[in-house]
Amino acid sequence: MRLTWKQKDFDEDIDFILFHQKDGTPKYWHYHLFHAYPDLDYNYCWSAGISEEQRFDYIVKQMKIQAKKRQDIVNKSVKSFQQFWNNNITDKLNKVFSSAFDNDCSNILNEMKAEVGLNPNCPRYIDKCSFDVYHYYDTQWAMTTALHEITHFVWFYFWQQHFKDNLDEYEFPNLKWLLSEIVVETIIRNSEIGNLIEFPQWIAYPYFYDMKINGKLLFDTMKKLYLERKNIYDFMEKAYNFIQQNEPELRKKIDEAESKTY
């Protein structure tokens, strides 16, 4: 397993920034951009009289200005993130992920890329083995983001070997995507991956941490399934079965949590 850090291409960056600024996007998702860039006029962009096209034009113009203003910060971030990664994580990566996933990881995912850019939402691209990191993160958050996304990549690598399904099923809003967002916390906190850095309070979406399904904390249930697994595939099957059985309650509570945010 190998990861390289680089700067994100602006045109690719803006494409996904606009993805979360479409009409009808919940505030939970579209507000992150305006929180990260106070110079952008939120009230203008999301006022009743503004069309999606007008919003997009405004955001593109403003983000070009931000890209020029922040170029030095982006360059410094790429260098510092790569340096910390090389000095503290690179040599340990294969060992801790092999242990966490009950499989040898030394010869998989050798061309992963962390692309440092302007988008505070930090999407991932499973087919390209790449993910975005917000340039203004401190080192702890950048490393957390990287290890979060790598856990997704390794999860889906072994998941696909086991289930032999379609990569399209791993994207939002599919249930397999949702499961992957839940298990990242479980795997990192309960394996040697958790020893690589000092992780922050939240690794997954914050609202998962106090969410109860069937009267039990979601992460307590997942932790028990993971620690008692026969192997990673046993955990995958049992975890997926659990969220299939409880999908209506889970989706309802996610919708409620996202509607309250901001």
Image: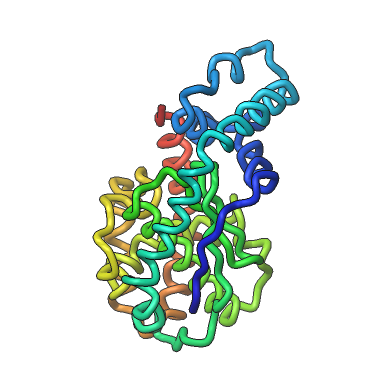
Q: Quadrant of residue 94?
A: bottom left
The residue under the point 42% across, 43% down is: 136
Quadrant in which the C terminus is drawn: top left
The residue under the point 72% across, 19% down is: 51
Q: How is the image coloured?
A: rainbow
Q: Where is residue 227 in the image (x, y as percent from the top left)?
A: 28, 75
Against 164, residue 41 (above or below) is above
User: Residue reaching furthest right?
Assistant: 53
Q: Position of residue 108 (x, y in %)?
A: 54, 82
Can I make out residue 175 in this image?
Answer: no
Against 176, residue 123 (above or below) is above
Q: Position of residue 27 (x, y in %)?
A: 51, 29
Pick whichever, 162 or 213, lies toward us. 162
Q: Quadrant of residue 54?
A: top right
The residue under the point 52% across, 68% down is: 4
Can I make out residue 194 in this image?
Answer: yes
Against 105, residue 170 (above or below) is above
Pick whichever, 137 or 256, lies toward us. 137
Q: Position of residue 256 (x, y in %)?
A: 43, 34
What is the count of numbered marks? 0
Pick whichever, 64 or 56, lies toward us. 64
The residue under the point 27% across, 60% down is: 220
User: Residue reaching furthest top?
Assistant: 49
Pick whichever, 123 or 68, lies toward us. 68
User: Residue reaching furthest front?
Assistant: 72
